[in-house]
Amino acid sequence: MRYGYIGLGHLGGHLAASLIKAGHAVTVHDIDPSVAERHIALGARWARSAKEVAEASDAVFTCLPSPAVSRKVLVGPQGILEGMQPGGTWIEMSTLGRDDIMTLAALAAPRGISVLECPVTGGVHRAASGDITLLVGGEKTLFDQHRPALQAMGGEIFHMGPLGSASVIKVITNMLAFIHLVAAGEALMLAKRGGLDLAQAFHAIKASSGNSFVHETESQLILNGSYDIGFTMDLALKDLGFAMRFGEEFRVPLALAGLTNQIFKQAQQSYGGEAWSTQVVKLLEDQLQTHLRAPGFPARLGEGMA
């Protein structure tokens, strides 16, 4: 099976590298050719456009920053559908809304192109180590056909059901993560202002009923002061926007998510859309003029994690 990979950013770059390292034939493309250097060194072939990737591939993965970019890469003049032969597969690893993936799949179907959605969760550091969680939506036979490639990129893999189902669970997991992040910041600030040693407080929370995956990971970056989670404020607000729309569609009041969305909007206004999403906690630090810092925590996850 010949694969293509388009979108070699913080997340996609690691996923594509894992696919290549597993021995799959991979053609890659990104708007920034320099990010593909390590993939070419691993044995990937470079393509000048999404169309050229599709021409060389039986299936093409994409990992892109927004639904608008995904649409352009799929149906644009130099897009995937212009180069892929009938019978090929597009596997979308970006976080899209359910309506987005269904609309794009409807554009691919008349060309004889099948679609899987496969958003991932767990953080850039887990993509780098090859054990990120994959959430898949689409036909079971199609999922089984591409399972070896998916296993090369991730750890746990969940087939959530038909196309669109993975989009819903991915938005839910991200919504939870952002709520947990704001809560973790408030908890650390209580510890700081209460006179506790922050490093000891971190470990106590980690061993307690109040622990979360976000505390175990992102709290370390807050305590280091780097905030470098590899995920931007703009991307966080995109996903929170999806969550709020699901709340309206499914008639579920999302009080905590709504408040979290407003806090992230404040952080975006204060620090910019390209700031790391973890800097949402900096709003509280700046408000109280109190930094949440402790020695012994890494600037990036995976680098001597506590």
Image: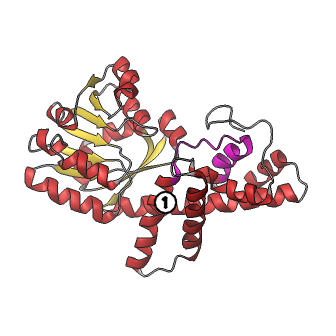
Q: Position of residue 25 (x, y in %)?
A: 26, 26
Q: Is residue 73 magenta?
A: no
Task: Please name the residue shown 25% across and 52% down the image.
Answer: 71
Task: Please name the residue shown 15% across and 43% down the image.
Answer: 77
Task: Please name the residue shown 40% across and 31% down the image.
Answer: 18
Whether residue 20 sits left or right of residue 227 in the image: it is left
- Judging depth in this view, the residue of 148 and 163 nearest the camera is 163
Instruction: Tell me: residue 293, above or below residue 15.
Output: below
User: For the residue carrying disc 1, how many other residues have a C-alpha within 10 Å: few (<14), some (14-19), or many (20+)?
Assistant: many
Q: Which residues are magenta?
A: 215-233
Is residue 238 something one can see in this rendering? yes
Amino acid type assigned to the residue bearing label 1 in the image: Leu
Is residue 208 something one can see in this rendering? no
Quadrant that contains the N terminus:
top left
Task: Please name the residue shown 8% across and 44% down the image.
Answer: 86
- Judging depth in this view, the residue of 277 and 178 nearest the camera is 277
Identify the residue position indicated by label 1 in the image: 237
Q: Position of residue 299 (x, y in %)?
A: 66, 36
Instruction: Tell me: residue 118, above or below residue 46.
Output: below
- Judging depth in this view, the residue of 40 and 131 nearest the camera is 40
Q: Position of residue 223 (x, y in %)?
A: 74, 45
Whether residue 21 sits left or right of residue 82 in the image: it is right
Whether residue 271 sits left or right of residue 53 in the image: it is right
